[in-house]
Image (spheres, grey):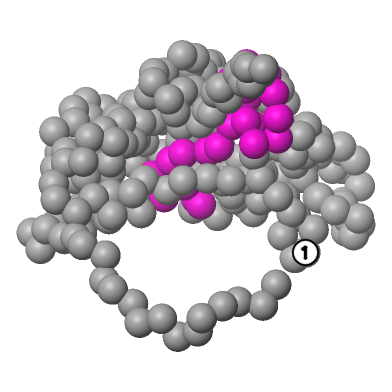
Amino acid sequence: MAAPAVTPKIYTAIGLDFETGGLDPARCACTQIALQALRLDTLEVFDRYESYIAPYCKQELGAARRKVLRAKNVPANSAERMDYEQVALDYSGITMEMLTAQGVDLKEVAASVIDFARRATLSKGVQCKPVLIGQNITFDVGFLTQLMSYAGLTAEFEKTFAGSKDFYGNFQPLYLDTILLARLTLAGDPSVASYKLELVAERLGIELDDAHDAAADTAATLDIVRVCAARLRNGDGALPAATPRQKTRDHFQI
């Protein structure tokens, strides 16, 4: 009897990049987000999302919320605005006027990210949830966590993206950092001294027209993934022979 047909799983990733109002996700705002969905089999981008994020205020998170004493003339619902450091705004070319005029409400952006991840899940099964990809992705994960926490969508975030909970019970999304991928590809070249996105892109022959724009950076990041994946799949360059290892025992106990 013939074996039953098995439908191949389609694995996907989401390229992610934030522009922000500073380096610290505990106090600085998200200003722009860009996402691109990538099939890992064909390396095809099949969905995109980008948005500016309207200015928003800080929130107290967790069970231990501090009671804030206010002057009598300060409304009870007033809150301190997130930090928008001028040096960070200048770095990305984003202005507060742009965020006010073109920005989308934080909760709406967070909901769009969840919807995007659901669309990017092309096969059933926990292993087919999308993985995040980015350049120095741990920076972006911090702001994505802030975004989901402020929007009250942490539970949906955990259900939608690949990942697991750490020792403290906090969800950590599964991700691939293209800095490490670039090091695996280029570390054998002594002339490569930096792994900044624009320098890696240039080294791999990738155009980056508008650095420090979230959409342009995301596109360049996924181009790096394509080039490195093509080298891995096509065997570009001779691989070193495996080092023979002396056998230390004849069997393993099970």
Label 1 sits on a secondary structure element that is loop
Please provide the residue range marked out in magenta: 115-139
* Residue 110 vertical position relative to residue 83 in the rendered view, above or below: above
Residue at horizontal 79 percent and vertical 58 percent from the top: 169
Q: Is residue 32 left or right of residue 106?
A: left
On the question of residue 157 being in view, the answer is: no
According to the picture, the residue beneath numbered tag 1 turns out to be 168
Report if residue 39 lies within the magenta region: no
Residue at horizontal 16 percent and vertical 41 percent from the top: 236
- Residue 85 percent across, percent down from the top left: 47, 47
Residue at horizontal 45 percent and vertical 85 percent from the top: 248
From the image, which quarter does the N terminus lie in? top right
Choose between 36 and 79: the one closer to the eye: 36
- Residue 9 percent across, percent down from the top left: 58, 25
Q: Is residue 33 left or right of residue 198?
A: right
Inspect the image, locate mark 1, and give the three-letter code of the amino acid beneath it: Tyr
Report if residue 132 lies within the magenta region: yes
Choose between 72 and 120: the one closer to the eye: 120
Residue at horizontal 33 percent and vertical 77 percent from the top: 245
* Residue 142 vertical position relative to residue 37 in the rendered view, above or below: below
**Outermost residue toward the left?**
191
Q: Is residue 75 left or right of residue 91?
A: right
Task: Answer with the quarter of the image where residue 68 lies.
Answer: bottom right
